[in-house]
């Protein structure tokens, strides 16, 4: 067990212990069944609400429980140690979709949508990605055509986490011409006429996470469903991305940490040629490198969280944290499988699920290549 981060206050240390106890008692017992059924354990919504884990970073008046982005990172890390698929479900609802309502929603929208999400009465999703537009947010094509009293949505979203669970969907749509200055965010309720949910997508990892295609076929929404300012959706998405990248980076740390712990334990008890494999230098050094990578990713991620909360321009810090943590997660889980050898290739091993789950972290929330572009531009290149 690692010592608390020097960035932690006493409250963070206490909260980390709360998260670990919650994961041990409430999450881990459901992981195997959730993976097999490819379904999020619905009872966790109320358990997370009762533990104050759905409203971190939000004020009490909207149903929040206080705390900061570092607290959210701690929660993300601990949940991911159990299961990436289970972790991403509430993280998307409360900490990727709901921030749009918190930062840009009207008072009425906060009361109608945000508070129910933070108190487990509703589930939220964020719908930006399309079949032809992923990291290139400015190229989305789903159209919102003005109509008397509202807008008519026409188009498709793809790879939407919580797509089949969500009661509230934050949708990015084109309201003017081309480019990033013509995107507006909308709040769409499920069900709404013209809004349809596709079948669950079968993914390589995150099996217990619900991921769908969303189809908007002449879906009419009122003017009151516009979220934030007209044609400012791109900038709202970019603002939300800073927090989303910290959450995903912290998930990477959790995956890496749990696989490292499993690999160390296995190396101590597995014997080859009459001795534990932990006594072979090549393997010992691999484990030491895994520890170093994980700690470096943790420091970058915690720093990005603190900088974001301080109000400074943390775009570079969040891009570095997301990039590095995702790559570290993939490297560490791969090395962990190698430590386990043939046993690591079996589904019942403690590392196989994490091996599958880690890969998407280099894609979701902005690919590695996007993070590198952000950093290169900040270097004046």
Image (tube, rainbow, N blue to C red):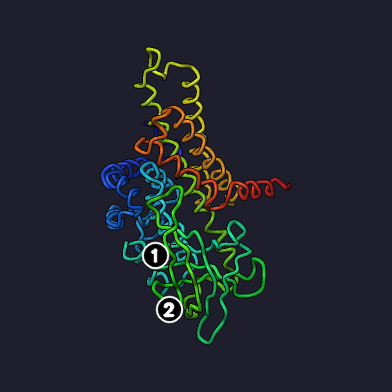
Query: What is the secondary structure assignment of the residue under circle 2?
Result: loop
| Disc 1 versus disc 2: nearer the observer | 2
Residue 52 in which image quadrant:
bottom left
Q: Nearer the viewer, residue 348 or 361?
A: 348
Count the marks: 2
- Crowd around label 1: few <14 · some 14–19 · many ≥20 (10 Å): many
Q: Residue at x 32, y 62 (%)?
A: 119
Question: Residues at badges 1 and 2 in contact (C-beta under 8 Å)?
Answer: no
- Crowd around label 2: few <14 · some 14–19 · many ≥20 (10 Å): few
Say whether disc 1 or disc 2 marks the residue closer to the N-terminus: 1
Mark 2, residue position: 193
Along the horizontal axis of the image, is 27 left or right of 142? left
Is 189 situated above or below 120?
A: below
Residue 192: image location, x then y, percent? 41, 76
Q: Residue at x 34, y 55 (%)?
A: 39
Mark 1, residue position: 166
Residue 110: image location, x then y, percent? 41, 69
Among all residues in the image, which is located at the extreme bottom? Answer: 148
Q: Nearer the viewer, residue 251 or 362?
A: 362
User: Quadrant of the image for the N terminus?
Assistant: top left
Residue 65 in which image quadrant:
bottom left
Residue 356 in which image quadrant:
top left
Along the horizontal axis of the image, is 369 left or right of 73? right
Along the horizontal axis of the image, is 226 left or right of 254? right
Residue 48: image location, x then y, percent? 31, 54
């Amino acid at each position: 067990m690692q010592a608390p981060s020097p960035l932690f206050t006493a409250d963070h240390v206490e909260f980390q212990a709360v998260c670990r106890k919650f994961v041990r008692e409430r999450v881990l017992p459901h992981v195997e069944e959730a993976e097999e059924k490819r379904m999020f354990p619905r009872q966790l919504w109320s358990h997370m609400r009762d533990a104050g884990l759905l409203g971190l970073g939000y004020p009490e008046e909207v149903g929040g429980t206080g705390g900061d982005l570092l607290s959210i990172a701690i929660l993300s890390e601990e949940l991911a140690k159990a299961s990436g698929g289970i972790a991403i479900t509430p993280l998307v609802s409360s900490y990727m979709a709901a921030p749009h309502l918190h930062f840009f929603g009207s008072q009425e929208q906060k009361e109608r949508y945000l508070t129910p999400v933070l108190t487990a009465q509703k589930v939220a999703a964020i719908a930006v990605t399309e079949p032809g537009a992923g990291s290139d947010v400015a190229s989305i094509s789903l159209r919102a055509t003005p109509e008397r009293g509202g807008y008519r949505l026409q188009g498709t979203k793809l790879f939407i986490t919580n797509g089949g669970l969500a009661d509230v969907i934050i949708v990015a749509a084109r309201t003017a011409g081309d480019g990033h200055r013509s995107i507006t965010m909308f709040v769409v309720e499920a069900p709404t006429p013209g809004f349809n949910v596709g079948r669950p997508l079968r993914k390589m990892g995150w099996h217990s996470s619900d991921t769908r295609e969303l189809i908007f076929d002449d879906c009419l929404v009122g003017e009151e469903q516009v979220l934030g300012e007209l044609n400012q959706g791109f900038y709202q998405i970019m603002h939300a991305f800073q927090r989303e990248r910290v959450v995903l980076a912290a998930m990477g740390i959790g995956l890496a940490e749990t696989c490292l712990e499993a690999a160390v334990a296995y190396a101590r008890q597995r014997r080859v040629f009459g001795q534990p494999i932990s006594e072979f230098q090549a393997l010992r050094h691999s484990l030491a490198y895994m520890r170093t990578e994980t700690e470096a990713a943790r420091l970058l991620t915690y720093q990005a969280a603190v900088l974001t909360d301080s109000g400074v321009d943390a775009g570079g810090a969040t891009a570095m944290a997301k990039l590095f943590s995702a790559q570290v997660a993939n490297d560490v889980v791969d090395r962990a499988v190698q430590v386990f050898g043939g046993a690591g290739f079996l589904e019942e091993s403690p590392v196989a699920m994490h091996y599958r789950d880690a890969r998407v972290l280099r894609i979701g929330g902005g690919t590695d290549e996007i993070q590198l572009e952000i950093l290169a531009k900040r270097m004046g290149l």
